[in-house]
Amino acid sequence: MRKLSFWAKHHPVPARIFIIISRIFLFFIACFLGKQLAAFGIGLSPLWIYFFIGVFFIAGATYPQKRSSSNYLKRKLYDLVIAGCGFFITLSFVVQLDSPFYATAQAAVPVNPSPYKYAEAKILLKQFKNGEKTKFTGKEKRIIRKEFNYQLLQYGKAKITGNKADAEQAILIFLACIAAVGLLYLVAALACTLSCNGSDAAAVIVGILGLAGVIWGLIALIRAINRKKTKTN
């Protein structure tokens, strides 16, 4: 970790760019995992959001101001806690957004749901299958993309309940978790070094913007993997 900090100190611009990209991926990883938990019916208490927010502000308020080799590990621990809180705040918030609707729908409609979440997607896919439609507009592509995301969640849920595909989806989630942990570690190694160079305000801005993201690429990879598996099957 000290080598990473040394590199960041002498390469501030690439380090900031890396932090921005890492935070963006972390944001999307948190969203992805939050949606997975909600889809599997796993809820989190709203108190977790307040807990992580509280820890986030406490860590920020008590962050070691004196920068020396003696408190290096302490500063890195604080960096990791701050980054981790941002990640889990996002994850908990996404679970809260999705879980209430999911739970209410399940309780209010005790019947077999339609395999399609979006009726428009069902119509579009049927038209495509029948050869009535060969091109899609941007809006139609977004509808199909949303349906694909929903079907991906349903696919994972079916796997976990006992189907062979469940294990494959679980592996993807494990990969997302591993990616998140690895990025949190790297961000923690670089974060305070930028502040040491007198860029505290920039580091805060970078952190906020960055928390808006690494998962876009990960989700794209997961989608590509699933598309290949679908074609193979």
Image (cartoon, grey):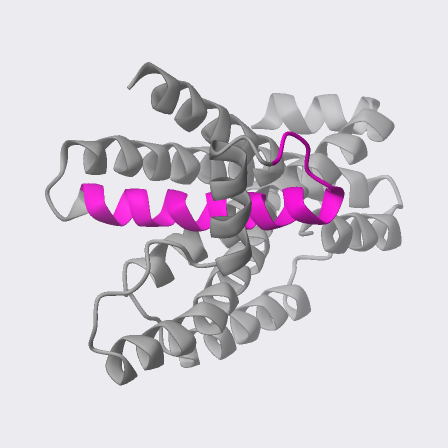
Locate the N terminus by quadrant. Answer: top right
Q: Is residue 158 magenta?
A: yes
Locate the C terminus by quadrant. Answer: top left
Q: Position of residue 226 (x, y in %)?
A: 40, 27
Q: Is residue 26 above or below residue 15?
A: below
Q: Residue furthest top?
A: 232
Which residue occupies 45% across, 68% down? 98
Which residue occupies 34% across, 59% down? 39
Q: Nearer the viewer, residue 154 or 44?
A: 154
Q: Quarter of the image holding residue 19?
A: top right
Q: Nearer the viewer, residue 157 or 46?
A: 157
Q: Position of residue 215 (x, y in %)?
A: 57, 39
Which residue occupies 28% across, 84% down? 108
Q: Where are the magenta residues, as a range? A: 133-159
Q: Is residue 76 magenta?
A: no
Q: Is residue 149 above or below residue 175?
A: below
* Residue 88 horizontal side relative to residue 17, left or right: left
Q: Nearer the viewer, residue 113 or 170?
A: 113
